[in-house]
Amino acid sequence: MDYTLLKAQKEFIKIPHKYKLDVAIYQGGYGSGKTFAGSLLGISLCGKYPGIRGLVGAQTFPLVRDTTLVSYFEHLDNYSCLKGISYDFCKTEAKLTIYNNDGKAPSEILFRSFDDATRLKSLNLGFVEIEEMSDISESAFHMLLGRLRQAKIPQYRLFGHTNPEFSKGWIYKNFIENPKPNYRLIIAPTTENTYLPEEFVDNLKRAYDPEYYNINVLGNFGDYTSGLITKGFSSENIQQVNYCPDLPLHISCDFNVDPMCWVLAHKTDDKVFFFDEIVLENTNTALTVKEFYSRYCLHNAPVIINGDASGDYRSVSSELTNYITIKKQLKQLGFTVDIRIRPFNPQIKSRIAAWNSKIRNANGEVGIYISPKCKQLLYNIENLKYKEGSSLLDLPSHYQVKSDKKLKFLGHPFDAASYIVEYYWPVKLD
């Protein structure tokens, strides 16, 4: 085929290392040749390794069918003019078979949706291609990596193409913040595609605001504070916070069976220092107290309990409230305990306002410091968002949590931390 590839496409297709596995993402704006490059690579692998089995998918099957599969057919029709190449497509199985007609084994490519990636666990694959990679979950990505185990394949490849993420997500963390040596991210701005009409980019520049243009044309990652609950957060808020056994220890609680989330902190008159968190799945209040004791049994100063006011109501399953359970157990273990909670929970917008005021106020002063140990709290800060076009928290549905277990930790750690902040430093809203 007489193709003259763009610089980014060449970089995407060619492997610059000798690792057994190559993981590459082609991230670009509209019209940057993402799908073209991905489907070309998939077909090239079928020619290079006869008998290989590949998987091509996206979060939804219509996206695979209407975008990726069409691009495969276009490349294959160009291949058909080459001697010894043929193919057929089984619509009922969504399977493409490519024949070399030279006695070598045919190659297969399966086209699937990743809305329930657990259905793909039995596959043994030589390559995986992902359309709109930012749409799938991190857990699905790792599961697909585990499918690359087809025998006699010299080098496995997982590759995807995507528009940039609007917020700091799993792609940013795995390919920018902490990439493995065989992980590659190729940025492909629309402006570098010389095959587009001259007016294409100019029209986009007139149509989009600067931030949207930066993401969807230049291919850059988005503004990580856009849409997030926590505003103004920076590396300055992340500090190595030391636990002090002789200072009052605050436990701020969000009561939930799965997960139960408590954050542990010291505070001054104008600052709070989160040094640890207790996040347990499928548990109860009594067991969480035991976990606290296993970590801080030698604490000398008072323990002050803050948190969710609803935890003070009587539970159907117990005659004791959550706070009475905590106080009783801790006193039996020798701690001095004080409970400080509101008679009822403030509105969520009040907690968010107080939280953001302490993260960084209008004068640039920081009042919240968080230890790297508080992984779930930091995960919430970087990922908990508003629903688009509203002031409501965008919490995952039961179905989403079932598909991506990590999502169950969105909301509860933030609630636990914001309760203590709002209690001591409330912000009056008009």
Image (tube, grey):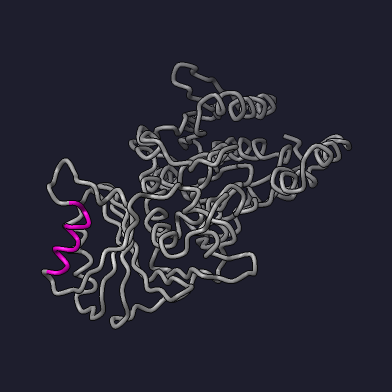
Q: In the rendered image of this protein, does residue 115 appear above or below residue 229?
A: above
Depth check: 416 or 353 in front? 353
Which residue is located at x 29 percent, y 50 percent?
Answer: 259
Whether residue 203 is in magenta: the answer is no
Point out residue 10 in the picture as x, y percentages from the top left corner: 69, 49
Residue at image point 50% right, 36% down: 50
Position of 137 with respect to 83 (left or right) is left
Between 271 and 298, the one nearer to me in the picture: 271
Tell me if residue 141 can be seen. Answer: yes
In this view, which residue lies farthest toward the bottom? 246
- Counting from the top left corner in percent of width and height, residue 298 is at 20, 79
Residue 221 screen position, x and y as percent:
64, 52
Residue 329 within the magenta-colored segment of the rendering: yes
Q: Is residue 374 left or right of residue 47?
A: left
Quadrant the N terminus occupies:
top right
**Magenta portion: prevailing SS class:** helix
Range of magenta residues: 321-331
In the foreground, 85 or 161: 161
What residue is at 60 percent from the left and 30 percent from the top?
Answer: 68
Residue drawn at (47%, 64%), measured in percent from left and top?
425
293 over 319 or under it: above or below: below
Would you identify the image quadrant in which residue 69 lies? top right
Q: In the image, residue 100 lies at what x, y percent? A: 55, 29
Which corner quadrant of the image does residue 246 belong to?
A: bottom left
Nearest the eye: 337 or 286: 337
Mark yes or no: residue 149 visible: no
Q: Is residue 284 left or right of residue 160?
A: left
> Is residue 103 shown left or right of residue 300?
right
- Does residue 95 lie above or below 284 as drawn? above
